[in-house]
Image (spheres, grey):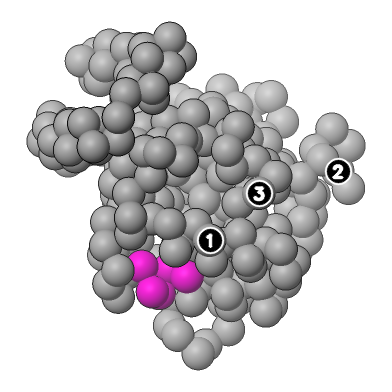
Amino acid sequence: MEKGFPISPDRAIFLADAHLNQDDTHSRNFLALAAKAAEEKVPVFLLGDIFDLWFGTKGLTFGFQKPIVEHLRELRGAGLRLYYVEGNRDFYLKREHEGTTFDIVSEGVMQAAVGNKRLYLAHGDTVNRADLAYRFWKGISKNRLSYGGVAHLPPSLILPLADRLERNLKRSNRRYRGAFPEKDCRELGLRLFRKGVDIVILGHFHQERLMRFSLGEATKIVAVLPSWKERWRYFFVTADGGYVFRAFKPGEPLL
């Protein structure tokens, strides 16, 4: 185990932004990937927004989400190591899902080590410094007091409002997601590399990116995860320092 990194698998896969919203091929392949990871004993890191909208309160769970969450819990109970970093569509999952659905839930960032590579994992929604409207929205929507008040309202009232909110949020974020903030990602990577991080992995932007940096004799990278629904793509890192994006194909090995 890398010193200071309690999460230290010898290999791992990473995906983000599945935005599951019904029982369809995307949801079934998502669960098939999780089942394959359990079979191959490969830890899975989910960097946010596996659903279009996810509340960490039982009464605010959409019907289609329940069998997916239950399946993940069964796989974890059978030995799958599963970690989650909250995205901008996730609200206070830690109390309900840490230790049940996931080994660890982070509301901000997560650090891990694969082999001797130190990883910084985040959803990535605050990387774009120009998106002031979103930063303001996040400050309000992630407020524990306001969420606590909403969570006590009847689900029959909240879930339709939440669905409408999700559609509005999707429209408001489209402009910033389309213009990838490469400069901000590079600056974030360089700041973290100076602190000893080797690999930065982000989601949120729905664009597959792999940026390499040569620092002395070392090569550091920033990997941005694509949207799951586009081509069922994920990223993996192995103990020998290998890394690559790959498309999930049912029946084939993950690594």
Q: Is residue 20 visible?
A: no
Is the C terminus in the top left, top right, bottom left or bottom right quadrant?
A: bottom right
Q: Residue at x 84, y 32 (%)?
A: 4
Mark number displayed over residue 100: 3
Q: Residues within 10 Å of mark 1 (few under 14, many from 20)?
A: few
Measured along the vertical axis of the image, is residue 86 above or below residue 44? Answer: above
| Residue topped by disc 1 | 70
Measured along the vertical axis of the image, is residue 225 above or below residue 160? Answer: below
Q: Start and end of the magenta stretch? A: 27-31
Q: Residues within 10 Å of mark 2 (few under 14, many from 20)?
A: some
Measured along the vertical axis of the image, is residue 252 above or below residue 202? Answer: below
Between discs 1 and 2, the one toward the N terminus: 2
Element at badge 2?
loop
Q: Looking at the rendering, which quadrant does residue 129 occupy?
A: top left
Element at badge 3?
loop
Going by the numbered disc 2, the residue's amino acid type is: Glu
Spatial CA span between label 2 and label 3: 25 Å
